[in-house]
Amino acid sequence: MATFLYKLGRLAFRRRHFVALIWIALLTLAGVGAASAPAPGTTSFSIPGTEAQKAFDLLEQRFPGGSADGGTGRIVFKAPEGEKMTDADNKAIVAKTTKELSDGSEVVSVTDPFTTNAVSEDGTVAYTSVKYDAPGMELADTTRDALVAAGDDARAAGLTVDIGGDALQAAAEPGAVGEIVGLALAAVVLVITLGSLIAAGLPLLTAIVGVGIGVSTITALANALDLGDTTSTLALMIGLAVGIDYALFIVSRYRGELADGRDREEAAGRATGTAGSAVVFAGLTVVIALAGLAVVNVPMLTKMGLAAAGTVVVAVLIALTMIPALLGYAGRTIRPAGEKRKSRQKKSEKSENAEKPQAAAKAGLGTRWAHFVIRRPAAVLLLGVVGLGAIAVPVTQLELGLPDEGSQPMSTTQRRAYDLLSEGFGPGFNGPLMIVVDAEKSDDPKAAVTTVTDGIKGLKDVVTVTPAAFNKAGDTATITVIPNSKPSSTQTEDLVHAIRDEGAGIKADTGAEVLVTGTTAMNIDFSQKLNDALIPYLGLVVGLAFLLLIVVFRSILVPLKAALGFLLSVLAALGAVVAVFQWGWLGGLLGVEETGPIMSMMPIFMVGVVFGLAMDYEVFLVTRIREAYVHGETPAQAIVTGFRHSSRVVAAAAVIMMAVFGGFISSSEQMIKMIGFGLAIAVFFDAFVVRMAIVPAVLALLGKKAWWLPKWLDRALPNVDVEGEGLKALDSRNSDSDPDNDRELVRA
């Protein structure tokens, strides 16, 4: 591996014009494809294998043209103080609003609150429901504008008006602010780490090229592969973070090779052969974690995972080829590591005319920290484990769910509409349940539906059960049930399960199948599906990566320690998410206005993404330690050497990732804010506590045992040579080679 990548790096350095043209051509091709591709068609959110999805599919079949998965809008009216909505003037305003909405595009139906009994008992609140023929996230902007304009007109006429429903839910996008903030912070860290604007610009440039190719390709294929707008969000976040980090590791190693006196082409080759090997295996762990999301069997997650994995592959290829090519262009503008410090030392020695032997250069922070951990490994290990364990305690109170309009800030019209409906009709009106009765196999469909209706009325926490609506064939009916509790409550979830239990008995007696669906039931099924898939997903991803790391480190205990450390960091990160977004700790500082259940996809999402990133740091740091150990150093010396060469760069890479993810915390979307915070805090815990403290402590305690591998397994495993052992043979060959060439030598 190292020898192959060494040759690839030197080839890219020499043929830099060709390599650069290839990547420019690929970026241009992807950009043209994205610009000329047809607009994405309507994409629907589906959860195969769940009862709620089965009910939606049945509705599409038995109620053709009914737009079962179409978006909904809701305009909630409240009469002025001392008036009622049933007053003539207020009824006229509502009638005008419903007429205005009915004339809009993509509208299937608009209800009249005075004929559908959608007026509160005290007469002060009423609502109009709008049904659309496309899902809420896929509606045209003009349709949303028309809904908002209708509400504004009614508000101008004197009513209190607010708008809810998924029709206002545009595709969640991180926004340019988060990206700009993340890139700006990353640029500052790169300049500090690499000490040069040119050197700092290379990782930023290559990361932007990689993300540009990845996101443009996703856009170009969106229509053909039925990709929604949200598919590129994860690819953007992960691609930007790993693209910068992978390039940073190779550039940093290049400067180290220059400091050892190698010419620039040789340094580029060796940096690609050593740090590039770590990049390949780190990228593989990220790809495994992201592609493994397909195990959940939710098409949206599968597409997001595969799209992000593809972007990571592009980032790896760019790091291995475009970075060496750009290093060739950079020439002398990128200096050897420590050159300025050495120059200052020489001047100081000359001015003082020191007669004593030259003192050893002052050890860096990473070296001093490694010595500290080696002296007190048990204390550092105990403190790290106990600290993260304490932060993970809130996970025991984790409540999962999907955010609804009740979790929106009070400043939004969706939240105000939610509260108005709760005030006028009860919290359950914000999450009605749709019951679909498939009576095709029943001898008496109407009697079967009546039995279902009567059974549901007798259940706890039911406020209203609407009369059944049959299809033309008379073999399928829909019933709307209004719970007494809000959509995200455990009481509503219990009611869904109770209806399903009731339906099982009815099917045995009448042959009619009872299915519960609607947004609330879909959210419950989605959460359950994610919970059921978490353990298999974790086993698959950790198992495959464990095998991969055995090949990389040629050890059993090191990969095991890496996996256990990851579990500790991800649990601590989830604990922090619960404390902030569920309990409200530091919520004001992070702009969390409303607390509530944690997004149901958060645990499995964090497991996938954080595992891949955690293994990045593990591979980059521990391969440097193993490289020193393989080259003859003692286990303790190898830890110090690994930290001397890698700790600064790993810390910088972690800070960059935190900056990229942290930039999304400013998003107004609760989901994006939660993801940004969760990933940023997870990177902090994993990089600075697990990899920088717990890992060296464990290695120090284990000593040579850390690198133990059964002999039979050692013979069976392929030798991938991540440490660059195979490059030693090149030193003797290069010393005998013809020095008369056009390479530029680095002056000591």
Image (cartoon, rainbow, N blue to C red):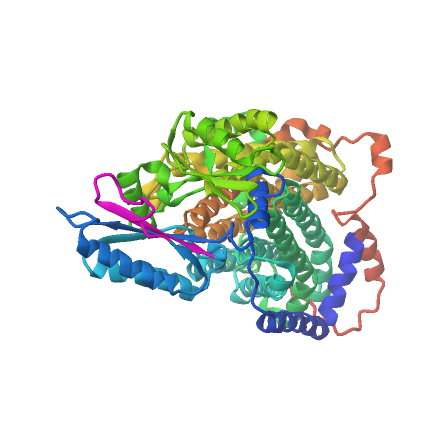
Q: Quadrant of residue 212?
A: bottom right
Number of numbered discs overlaid on the protein picture: 0
Q: Is residue 58 left or right of residue 9?
A: left
Q: Position of residue 260 (x, y in %)?
A: 68, 56
Q: Kindly identify the residue that appears in the image at 62 percent across and 44 percent down.
A: 612
Residue 119 among magenta residues: yes
Q: Kindly identify the residue that appears in the image at 76 percent across and 57 percent down.
A: 5
Q: Quadrant of residue 622?
A: top right
Residue furthest to the front: 444
Quadrant for the C terminus, please.
bottom right
Q: Position of residue 365 (x, y in %)?
A: 52, 44
Let me know if residue 693 appears in the view.
no
Q: Is residue 651 left or right of residue 462?
A: right
Of 150 and 326, nearer the camera is 150
Residue furthest to the left: 82
Residue 74 among magenta residues: no
Of 89 and 167, nearer the camera is 89
Q: Position of residue 255 (x, y in %)?
A: 63, 59
Q: Position of residue 485 (x, y in %)?
A: 37, 32
Of 365 and 293, nearer the camera is 293
Let me know if residue 38 appears in the view.
yes
Q: Quadrant of residue 692?
A: top right
The magenta span reads 111-132
Q: Kindly identify the residue that appears in the image at 62 percent across and 46 percent down.
A: 616
* Magenta: main secondary structure: loop
Q: Is residue 615 left or right of residue 42?
A: right
